Image (cartoon, rainbow, N blue to C red):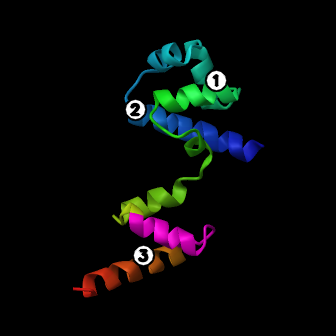
């Protein structure tokens, strides 16, 4: 359970930063106190399922997004591959190493460049 709690707090913090909303505004929209948002971000407590739904709506994310490890996505984004290429590579093996993922995506790019 700790792993999903860690993913949630990391992704919640990321979504808050990307949204540009203050903790106070998020708290108002989710109908909780500002300190509750802080507790969720720090991992001191976890929201109920209904609050996760409200958080997701407020931050324009799917509820499941908060429980996904996005670390590989960030590494690939830095390499400027598009989402279609990323989806293809992850379909090969969802637990693929970063090095193998880079190789696959480089190969996909090579094929695309030589199709025309």
Q: Are marks 2 and 1 in contact (CB under 8 Å)?
A: no
Residue named by callout 3: 105
Q: Which residues are magenta?
A: 84-98
As drawn, the label of residue 3 is none
Q: In terms of sequence position, does the residue under pointer 1 or pointer 3 come before the other?
A: 1
| Residue 111 among magenta residues | no
Report the Cα–Cα distance between label 2 and label 1. 19 Å
Residue 7 or residue 50, whichever sits in front? 50
The residue shown at (36%, 66%) is 81
Q: In terms of sequence position, does the residue under pointer 2 or pointer 3 come before the other?
A: 2
As drawn, the label of residue 39 is 1
Q: In terms of sequence position, does the residue under pointer 2 or pointer 1 come before the other?
A: 2
Nearer to us of marks 2 and 1 is 2
Residue named by callout 2: 19
Mark 2, Cα crowd under 10 Å, few <14 / some 14-19 / many 20+, is few
The residue shown at (58%, 38%) is 63
The residue shown at (50%, 13%) is 28
């Amino acid at each position: 359970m700790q792993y999903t709690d860690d993913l949630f707090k990391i992704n919640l913090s990321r979504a808050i930063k990307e949204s540009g909303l203050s903790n106070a505004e998020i708290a108002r929209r989710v109908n909780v106190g500002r300190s509750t948002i802080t507790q969720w971000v720090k991992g001191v407590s976890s929201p109920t399922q209904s609050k996760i739904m409200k958080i997701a709506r407020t931050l324009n994310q799917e509820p499941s997004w908060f429980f996904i490890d996005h670390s590989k996505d960030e590494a690939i984004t830095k390499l400027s591959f598009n989402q279609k290429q990323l989806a293809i590579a992850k379909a090969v093996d969802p637990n693929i190493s970063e090095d193998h993922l880079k190789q696959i995506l480089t190969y996909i790019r090579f094929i695309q460049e030589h199709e025309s």
